[in-house]
Image: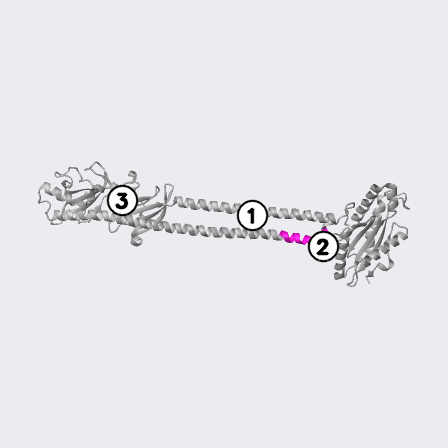
Amino acid sequence: MLISFRSRWFPSTGQTAFQRRASKAAIVVALITLVAIRAFSVVNQVEDHNEQWQTYHQSINNIGILVEQDVERSIEIYDRSLLALADSITRQDLLGQDPGTRQRLLSGQRPQNYDAGIGSLIVLDENGTVVLDSESVAPRQASVADREYFLVHKNASADMGLYISHPLQNRLRNAEWIITLSRRINNPDGTFAGIVVGTIALDQFERLFTKVVLTANDSITLFDKDGTTIVRWPFTKAVLGQTLNDPELLKKIDEAPDGHLTVKVSANGVERLRDYRRIGNLPLIQSVGISISDNSTLFWIMSAISLICFLVLCAAVLILTLQLESELRRRQMAEAALEELAATDELTGLANRRKFDDALAFEWRRAERENKPVSLLMLDADFFKAYNDTYGHQAGDKALRGIADCIRAGIKRPADLAARYGGEEFAVLLPATDHLGAFHIAEAIRARVFAMGLTHNKSLYGVVTASIGLACMYPRQIDDPAKLWRAADDSLYLAKASGRNGVAPLQHSKVRRAG
């Protein structure tokens, strides 16, 4: 009951509610700040990721251009040798020489980087028989009439230009893996007379591709125009001759500006950014793939770590804020308890005189504003000194506690306040209570005290009793609570003089207005 008065008579309790709202607001502000920081971090991460993608695109484009230029230059150099050789044969310049001279002249037609992978030049007649060989005066003999590159030219109705074969094993030289570059030779009447053939070892492309700095998960692949794999770095024999099996991709490459297309693909658990581009006017497509799995994995790992740190930070802020709020609450409760203790009579548990005076001043001003009455009961235990002398102070303390319980039982409203005012004297404040209502409450308290039946041989009634003085006033601005005190004290004096164990309101205080 005493605590219920705190918000009314002690403004510090209002500060507690404010502090709670402030702590909740602090949590919200802290979370909003963390969310803003997290959003800023995410934006930065996304920007970094986008910049990394731009770097990847630029890097793969540069690598693609470099590889394209090297492959195109190597093949064009060799193709010029084939053109020169075919022209010499057509003009009969070479065939009119003796075998040794023909071999030396044919050998001289080869590009000067033979050791780097450029192989032999040979001439096949219309039956696929080797008639000229850059590596031997007497042409090496092997059946090549069934070779794809020979049949393509033989079955063509006209000169189809440079033809680049699928990967195959060289029948003339150690079964090494090669591709062939070939051109058709025509008779004067335009009929098929044979072909000139040059070989390039696949090792040549591997050496060419290794000039580009790549990681273990990167790759470079060379396809023909139909998507058949010619060579791949790192070298994998199993993929030679395989096709893309993706007509839609080939169509996109054809339709892409400059025959250049960059796509994101995933294979064998590795995510790559792959660049496809046609190599000049050659019937070739190159593909450069650089691994982005490590970067993507790192990005998601860093994002996950960042999110976990954010959640941990949020949890830490919430925990610290809740701990702070809990600590503030405990401190406020401790302060409230101390304040309550300081305002409570230790023996009876009722309010003490200081608290009662504060409450009376507060209720007096409120009643003045609202034009309502204020009633005051002054209660005194009858013959209490004689009771103490007869039964001892411990019995006296027990009697006072019993009277306090009777008073507590007699007041029901939260606004009512009972206090031990001194010694055996008690006071009861009844805000917004008229004279009649106060009288009923006073009479009920008196009856409870009498009903306790505490033996008191020195009393006229044989038990402990109480006299109660009642006063009721309507406060005005010119008044002060002392008038109500004096009126109630006078009523108490009258109750004592009237034989005790009674309630005595003064006749003029029944509906009295102060002043």
**Camera-nearest residue between 179 and 392:** 392
The answer to whether residue 473 shows anywhere in this view is: yes
Magenta includes 16? yes
The residue indicated by pointer 1 is 317
Residue 481 versus residue 154 in the image, above or below = below
Residue kind at label 2, given as amino acid type: Arg
3D distance between C-alphas at marks 2 and 3: 92 Å
Q: Nearer the viewer, mark 1 or mark 2?
A: 1
> What is the secondary structure assignment of the residue under circle 1?
helix
Other-residue count near label 2 (Cα within 10 Å), few / some / many at <14 / 14–19 / ≥20: some
Q: Earlier in the sequence, mark 2 or mark 3?
A: 2
Left or right of residue 349, residue 180 in this image = left
Image location of residue 92, percent across then percent down: 10, 47
Label 3 Cα neighbours within 10 Å, binned few <14 / some 14-19 / many ≥20: some
Instruction: Name the image colouring.
Output: one colour
Whether residue 171 is situated above or below residue 323 in the rendered picture = above
What is the secondary structure assignment of the residue under circle 3? Answer: helix
Percent coordinates x, y for residue 485 in the rendering: 82, 56
Prevalent SS, magenta region:
helix
Q: Which tag, 1 or 2, sits closer to the chain's start?
A: 2
Residue placed under numbered mark 3 in the picture: 208
Q: Residue at x 21, y 38 (%)?
A: 170
Stretch in magenta: 4-20
Amino acid under label 3? Leu
